[in-house]
Image (tube, rainbow, N blue to C red):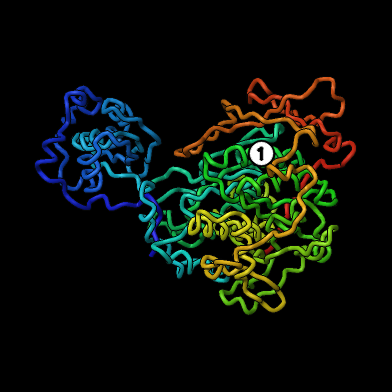
Amino acid sequence: MLATHGRTNRRAGTATASLAVGLMVGASLLGSPLAAQGAAPSTASKGNVTPELVRIAKEAPSRSVEVIVQFRSRAALAAGADSVRAAGGDPGSKLALIDGLQATIDARRAVRLAGLSGVRAVTLNGRVDTKAYSGDLDKDRLATAYNHSIRADNVWFNDGGTTGQGVGVAVIDTGIAGDHVDFRKSQNDASSRVVASVVVNPDATTPKDTVGHGTHVAGLIAGNGSVRPSSDRLDGRYAGVAPGADLVNVKVADDQGNATVADVINGLQFVVDKKSEFNIRVANLSLASTVAQSYTIDPLDAAVEQAWFAGVTVVAASGNSGPDSVKYAPGNDPYAISVGGADDRGTKDPSDDVVAPWSSTGNTQDGIRKPELMAPGARLVSTLAPRSAYAAQCPTCIVSGQYLRLGGTSMAAGVVSGAAALLAQVNPSWTPDQIKGALIAKHRDVPGVGEEIAVDDARGASGDDLVSNVGLTANSFIDVATGLVDPARTGWRGLEWEAATGEMRTGWRGASFVCSCVATAAMADDDPRRLTLGGADPTRTGWRRTGWRDASMDPARTGWRTVDWATSFTR
């Protein structure tokens, strides 16, 4: 059995009497809100503080720790934030399901906090120990076959549990419903694993996924139905390939799902800029430009390559136009991992897999064979964004009220992005070239499909198996010395990220980064070729004009007004 991180044994162990007395509540807590309610302080008692926290308090009392504070009543929880502050800590998000509260506090004060009679327990947040991810995901309860087909379930139960924990995956799409229960951190921690949210399309009026595409893809990458309460009939029924990974919501579409190439480029810029902050190792692009041209001059391909050279593995859908149609960015870029769609026919046995007829395959205009990999993409069930357009367009696609059945290379790309996150956790030093090399070298040959991913084999790749992208010529906008887009060649200026306020802030309880940011770029007012991305009220969103000075980005000249989402309704 495999558990979500953050699920720790709250009744394990006992503090020694001498230590409990030595760390009993000090005078600073006597005036805390809990004490004012008559919840008199006491020493940390047996079972309400974990031995590991007691050990840290003894050996490094001033060490800052992340804890979960459980209270004995809703009234105590209501005063909990003030109590944590009075104890010298920094309160975080509420965990109402367990009458709890996240907090950051030094270890000595955490043990003192546990001594309040209104506190049931103070335990370390499981995220401080990656080995805590050990058991509630039951592969036999899964209602879907794709994780078995690509053998991701074998990886989950190796090395104490490999689920993508700590790895950030950016979903550059229509948004993510970050408050969906399958994105929670654990049964005991209701905060969202969507750790960051950015909106780069100025025509969007909300950070929510009003379309449903991005939420579905995100669930295939990192959904986790095992975080549902055990009494929930859907507990453990659905899970993504990397059910412990963090997600970064990069919303590039407006509320109707429209996006320009420039929006996607801005989204990739955010990924590059925030890579270290959120440990973004993988970026999923389940979309395609509407203009076919060589990757060597395509600006979206240039942005993809910049992200790749910055250390982000970019996974792109090959498209849904059938054979001889892989000529659109980003699926035509030779550096990125392009993914085609297989139909696993709903079985765990890959021997009956076939290529989906809509999957784009063939050679690009530059003579490069694409896609490199195939993955299940037909009739996949994943997370449903509430009140989204997809739910309205295909009510018969809704499964159990909270999931949606869709098909397309968009979905197949999400599956491979999850696989890349698993490899990034097992081998954190691997570069994008090495992750791509491992997935290709250790593929499984499936008759009629070609090279389909086999995640358990790829995780153990080594030596020459890790080599890929040798001898390629970079996009002409890329400075080969730095691996970055050369602004002197493109006219692109740098971006700034600023916080949005009011309605544009996400309301996801517990997300560690709940601010929707926006891309801004100064541009000469006298440049008639600018691409204006306006539409939202700047006084409400804080957005300023974003644009690209290069004339090739002018929609009047290129026709790049939209991108296509590589998905379709399949029952």
Quadrant of the rendering where the C terminus is positioned: bottom right
Residue 359: image quadrant is bottom right
Question: Residue 471 sits in which quadrant?
Answer: bottom right
Number of dots carrying numbers: 1
Q: Pick out the residue farthest to the right.
A: 557
Is 492 drawn above or below residue 193 in the view shown?
Answer: above
Where does the image place residue 255, in percent across and percent down from the top left? Answer: 69, 39
Q: Residue at x 43, y 54 (%)?
A: 228
Taking 281 as reference, is 50 left or right? left
Q: What residue is rendered at 37% in x and 49% in y?
A: 6
Residue topped by disc 1: 269
Residue 382 image point, x, y percent = 58, 57
Direction from residue 172 to residue 527 in the image, left or right: right
**Could you say which is closer to the camera, residue 546 or residue 503?**
546
In the picture provided, is 317 more to the left or to the right than 186? right
Q: Image point 52% across, 45% down: which residue?
A: 279
Can residue 396 be seen in the rendering of this structure? no
Tag 1, which secondary structure? helix
Image vertical order of residue 181 relative to residue 159, above or below: above
Q: Quadrant of the N terminus?
A: bottom left
Tell me which residue sits at (76%, 68%) in the image: 357
Q: Is residue 462 visible?
A: yes
What kind of residue is marked 1? Gln
Q: Position of residue 299 (x, y in %)?
A: 78, 43
Neighbour tally class for label 1: few under 14, some 14-19, many 20 plus, Cα within 10 Å: many
